[in-house]
Image (cartoon, coloured by chain):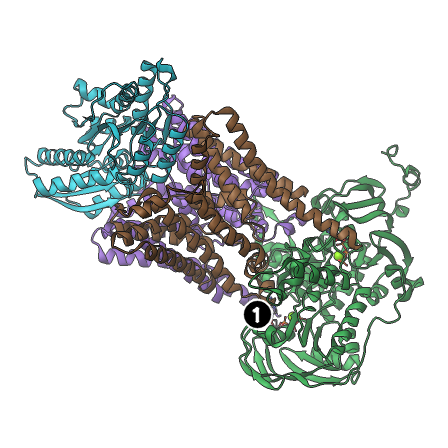
Chain colours: A green, B purple, C brown, D cyan
Amino acid sequence: MVGTNPHGQAAETAVAAASVPILELRGLEKRYGATHALKPADLTFARGEIHAIVGENGAGKSTLIKLLTGVITRTSGEVFWEGRPVALATPHEAIEFGINAVHQEVVLCRHLTVAANMFLGDEDVGFGLLRKGEMTRKAQSILDDLGFQLPAHVLLGDLTIGQQQLIATARASIRGTRFLIFDEPTAYLTRTEAAQLFALIRRLKERGVTIVYISHRLEEVFELSDRVSILRDGTLVGTRITAETNETELISLMINRSLEQIYHKEFFEAGDVLLETKNLSGPGFRDVSLSVRAGQIVGLYGLIGAGRSEFVLSLFGRHHKTGGSIFWQGKEVDIRSERQAMDLGIALAPESRRDQGLCINLPVGFNLNLPIFPHITMAGLVPFSADRQRADRQITDLQVKASGRGALVSSLSGGNQQKIVIGKWLNHGARLFIFDEPTVGVDVGTKAEIYRLLARLLAEGAGIILISSYLPEVYELADELHVFRQGEDVARHAYHAASHEEILSEAIGV
Amino acid sequence: MSTDTKSAAVVRKSSANWLFGLTLLGLLLAMCLVLSLTTKSFMTETNIMNLMRQGSMIAILAVGETFVIITTGIDLSVGAVVGFCTVIAAWLLTHDFSIFATVIITLGVGVAIGMFHGFGIVQMGLPPFIITLATLTSLRGIGLLVTNGATINIVNDTFTEFSRNDFVGLPNLFWMVILVGVPAYIFLHHSRYGRYVFAVGSNMEAARLSGVNVKLTVYLAYTLSSTCAAFVGLLLAARIGVGNAMQADGWELQAIASSVIGGTSLFGAVGSVHGPLIGAFILATINNGANLLNVNSFWQRIITGLLIILIVYFDQLRRRRG
Amino acid sequence: MSTDTKSAAVVRKSSANWLFGLTLLGLLLAMCLVLSLTTKSFMTETNIMNLMRQGSMIAILAVGETFVIITTGIDLSVGAVVGFCTVIAAWLLTHDFSIFATVIITLGVGVAIGMFHGFGIVQMGLPPFIITLATLTSLRGIGLLVTNGATINIVNDTFTEFSRNDFVGLPNLFWMVILVGVPAYIFLHHSRYGRYVFAVGSNMEAARLSGVNVKLTVYLAYTLSSTCAAFVGLLLAARIGVGNAMQADGWELQAIASSVIGGTSLFGAVGSVHGPLIGAFILATINNGANLLNVNSFWQRIITGLLIILIVYFDQLRRRRG
Amino acid sequence: QAEDYTIPIIVKDTTSFYWQIVLAGARKAGADLGVNVPELGAQSEADINGQISIIENAVSSGANALVIAPTEFKALGKPIDEAAKSVPIIGIDSAADSKAFTSFLTTDNVQGGRIAADGLAAAIGAANDGKVEGDVALITNLPGAGSLEQRAQGFKEQLAAKYPGLKLVADKVGDGQATTALNIMTDLLTANPDLKGVFASNLIAAQGAGQAIAENKLGEKVALIGFDNDDKLVGFLKDGVIDALVVQDPYRMGYDGIKTALAAVKGEKVEPFVDTGANLVTTANMNEPRAQELLYPKVK
Ligand SMILES: Nc1ncnc2c1ncn2[C@@H]1O[C@H](COP(=O)(O)OP(=O)(O)OP(=O)(O)O)[C@@H](O)[C@H]1O
Ligand SMILES: Nc1ncnc2c1ncn2[C@@H]1O[C@H](COP(=O)(O)OP(=O)(O)OP(=O)(O)O)[C@@H](O)[C@H]1O
Ligand SMILES: [Mg+2]
Ligand SMILES: [Mg+2]
């Protein structure tokens, strides 16, 4: 074994168990056809450390994780587990070593119960039969132990996406007994849920579990990690000890330039009122009265499940209101379909890119142009040139990393997919833009671009409703901030008029 | 969420499931009630025995089909497998194989066909619809070739009497439903691989990432389906006393319809063993009742179609509400 | 990424698509070449004309079916609609309706059936498999009821001659493929609603939130499929000169197979118009060739099944690689 | 030299035993006469379009003559006219709406239905001390198949004309499956306890119906008439489950069809119409040589 090992010397000297890194990568590489997703990387993970990985969208973070958990097979390179080369060809093999991951998109079975999901692939069996009651009890005690207040017997599909994410975490933590990877775990979590997660991660670290943590939120990286590695364009550009670096250095390593300011905010003269709701009620929200003016960003903050998405879906005609009224540029309207909302001049970039935002097995160009086919149709037909021009312009403007407008959306990284969700509305000529969690899974550089884009839309006379569960984002950007709690609009603040703490307590309701 | 409300939710959930099973059973019983009021002959012992015989073969097929549908697949070949296996069984019996050997070999043929489907889907990456459609076509051809387009007469009386006889007051055929249904129930609802069948149907990627052997599970589902079909082939050969490759034409659609009437979702991950069984007997009762009421054969088709729509519609409603 | 590499990629992509179309066409041509070398009679004018006639009806059905499959649906009723529409057409013609009126009314029946499917799927929330299976059963029943299980003779010679005659050297039936295929191509690949068909098949909710009228699109797909089937019903009535509800049995499976051979994905959002057309003529050539080579009809079934597996397998390979 | 002749035989449905006997006769004729005989046929008796395509292919593949069993009277008329422009056509089994046949060797299916009615009446009479009365039923295997319609027609006409005591209480149409015929038969027996007789108008229907009667041990009580024959039905006939079979002479149709076609190709004069006949074979007469010849055709 040693003989075939080009780095044999390292393996030989690493006899003292404690000094052998738990996992070591040598020249690990992955290509998807022409895409070089991960260029040969050397990296070691020490026992019991929390190792953060940061990088732009499409930098190769998820690819690295998938390689380590046996989800995809590597193109070349070697992986050493406690000094011994391992194949890691299947998820099963990785689980056997005690390696597990919480993947970026929640991957669990909606039709099975929480307990069944937690023990999937590792069921308790007696006399050939499943011990269902036993497993439910165990799952419940694990959940209770972790402090997640979730029932173990309900169907997973009945939980919110954030709760599902927590179940995925709990599940990974009972399998990844040695090495646990989190790929953007907080993207769908509320603040309290995130706090629960951090507590869990620290506890696992105390137990000697090695943790890899991927996030676009740098403050989380600084809060949690011991070391941080930076990926850029598939290349591992460096590893830093977290205590010895700072946000500016990380950003410049990630995007190869410095970024003075992430939250790009411009102030415009408030124009005429575009949209106004009076005591609007609908499925999931009650009695919401607010107005949006041209040149203004109205922020909606709240915990996940507070009813903000439901509110904007009703504005967009996806659900029908049950009470109250909507005024569009002063005139009362009854919006009954998405098309009607679009014709009025409303655009909505929905919160779930996978379920609501994208046709992921269709090309990028198709997705970008889908909302505007009625505009570019001539005599019932879509002219090829208009189709191509508009798609190509969007791809260039948004710097979408794709092999062309013919590439399928499913081959893009998470963040680049998010750019398509937003980009498809920019050509539409709307006056009111609704962005529901527009920066979930988006890297800092792109976030800054998106914020610039908002400013550009405002400058052109549009109004914006911005929904975010990430308080700094709405706090820094919104001209007027509404706080939602359990379907109600419980507070309204002008720009920077209240502190983070005040807003949080309003959202939680203590 | 407190433990109390949690367990309350459990009770509600499982009683709803139970009620759903009941409601289908209720429908079946209501149909029986109406028929026993409108005809003299429905509630006679012979007719009930006939009904049990008539429903049982589709019922067994529907159980096998259900495994496949739960994995989001479909098995269009089951009717052809039945026909083909009547030929195999008849051929073996006329070539002096013992009944025992005949049963084992015929079931083995079923297993082989199922493995082939698994191979096509897992290894070759073919859509289940296509590979099973291809097998449908080819198997009928092979069966016809074996018999040279004719029927093989089965002269073994022990074999042919099996489908006719009763045991402890129930037709043997109905016992066969129980023989298949009980292990199938335990397998699907209480075994590890049964659960994997659901997991694969719900989210194949998640199942794979959890270390579930997805390929094996798919193989298993198709093999069970084909084996059930081969078993039905044996029963059919015994019942009609001949081997004929063109028999059981269209039974795949009846099996699928039974399964869906019994609450199986064609989008996968939803289904049971008892539902399809009840579904098959509902269809059998529709036909039996129509025959007893001497409804024109053409109206029978029309009514069957409409009832399928109605039953599945109300089932959807109930599930959406529940 | 520079603009150059991007446009290169575009070219590569679209040429790959083109090549895929070509490869199927290549397969068809290769089959023709082999047949013209092994038989004297294949490359005769009459035989090519026959081949065109024989493939054309399934080809038209396959185009209609493709719209439905792209929306991730399935239409099992097309064969029954064809049979039913031969009855309608024959009934109308024997009741002294003009040919024009007959054509319009029969197509109208097709539209109505498609709307009913749309209604069942969109408003009642039924799985396409179930609603079209139910229509299949019921329509055969209604057709049999109308004819009382018999056939209706069509005495109108102008009507019946249509399917036999040629125009500018091509059989009228083949012209009908062009008549349906060209607008279908433009509709699917170049019109707004054609794109919506793809969008709905890929992600219904995303399509909806992009302003696509999803319900209308679903209605449209099923209506087109049933209307194509009604049109084929007219052609078949003209070809066989009678109305008979049991005709076109199993054609739905042939249409689906043609569509899938032609590159349509049963998981939705992938498909074309030219693919299924070529697929249908590949199937027709297999049968024609087998007849000319005097292959036993049982072997024909076996070979057809195997070829379907092979063709779809290689298509998968090519697409995965491409 | 006869070897150079190709005379395809086109039957209605290659998947049934009856047509296999026709093909066997044709094959034998081909071997005896040195003619090349491709055996063609559609996938089902109801598949009209399939048969039309086969005729087209056969003509274009350069046949010298065609022997054909038209699947539907009206529908095959035009295609046969068309084909007759190129080659002589010999019709067997059933007629078609065409004057272009060089020769016809057919059984009259309507007549077959009448014979079945006579057979049924005789069987009921024999079982009921000469009283020909009571409830009877008809089971048709498949809707929409021409010859089955004609048999039903002949059967019903004869009942109405000659046996007023026999009341047709059920006219059932199956879906081509023996099992369906079996289920229909058991339900008929349940719904009509006084049922006296049944006519199952083809091989498959008779197999199913016979099985139901055997299962319920009603061979004595219910008379069953089948149409066509195979080992299974002959077994039933022996056991008294089936009282009589209407038997045609498919082997001869096949054999003589090819023979006549060859004569026509050579320009010899041929008989324009030959009735190959339908015979009633009962349990009583089944051991006569002619019956034996019909019941056990030399298929292989
Ligand atoms: N299945 C695939 N086929 C082709 N290319 C792929 C595939 N999956 C990922 N890629 C490409 O590999 C590169 C790295 O993707 P990866 O998902 O690892 O990025 P990431 O760092 O996780 O980004 P994000 O922060 O957006 O999640 C991207 O360019 C992406 O387009
Ligand atoms: N999958 C679901 N199943 C059941 N109820 C849900 C589901 N998703 C949301 N809800 C309920 O709908 C209501 C509003 O949820 P919604 O998603 O609109 O909240 P939100 O404030 O938009 O949160 P966010 O956008 O951050 O996810 C809540 O009562 C929530 O519990
Ligand atoms: Mg990622
Ligand atoms: Mg939301």
On the rendered image, what quadrant is the C terminus of chain C found in? top right
Outermost residue toward the top?
A: D1
> What is the number of callouts on the image?
1
Please give the chain letter of the residue carrying mark 1: B
Which residue, given by chain and number where applicable, does mark 1 sit on?
Answer: B5
Residue C107 appears in the rendering? yes
**Badge 1, how many Cα within 10 Å: few under 14, some, many 20+?**
few
Q: Nearer the viewer, residue A298 or D103?
A: D103
- Give the percent coordinates (x, y) of residue A234: 82, 52
Amino acid at pointer 1: Thr
Outermost residue toward the front?
A: C168
> Does the closest atom of ligand 2 sit within 8 Å of the Cβ of label 1?
no
Q: Nearer the viewer, residue A25 or C173?
A: C173
Q: Nearer the viewer, residue A211 or C279?
A: C279
Figure check: A96 above or below A152: above
On the rendered image, what quadrant is the N terminus of chain C found in? bottom right
Task: Indicate the quadrant where residue D137 lies.
Answer: top left
Q: Is residue B152 left or right of residue B204?
A: left
Q: Residue at x 63, y 77 (%)?
A: A486
Figure check: C181 above or below D207: below
Q: Is residue A224 left or right of residue A380?
A: right
- Give the percent coordinates (x, y) of residue C252: 43, 46
Q: Is residue B14 left or right of residue A219?
A: left
- Give the percent coordinates (x, y) of residue C126: 45, 59
Figure check: D74 above or below B99: below
Q: Is residue C63 left or right of residue A228?
A: left
- Give the percent coordinates (x, y) of residue A361: 63, 54
Q: Nearer the viewer, residue D130 or D77?
A: D77
Residue B43 appears in the rendering? no
**Circle 1 SS class:** helix
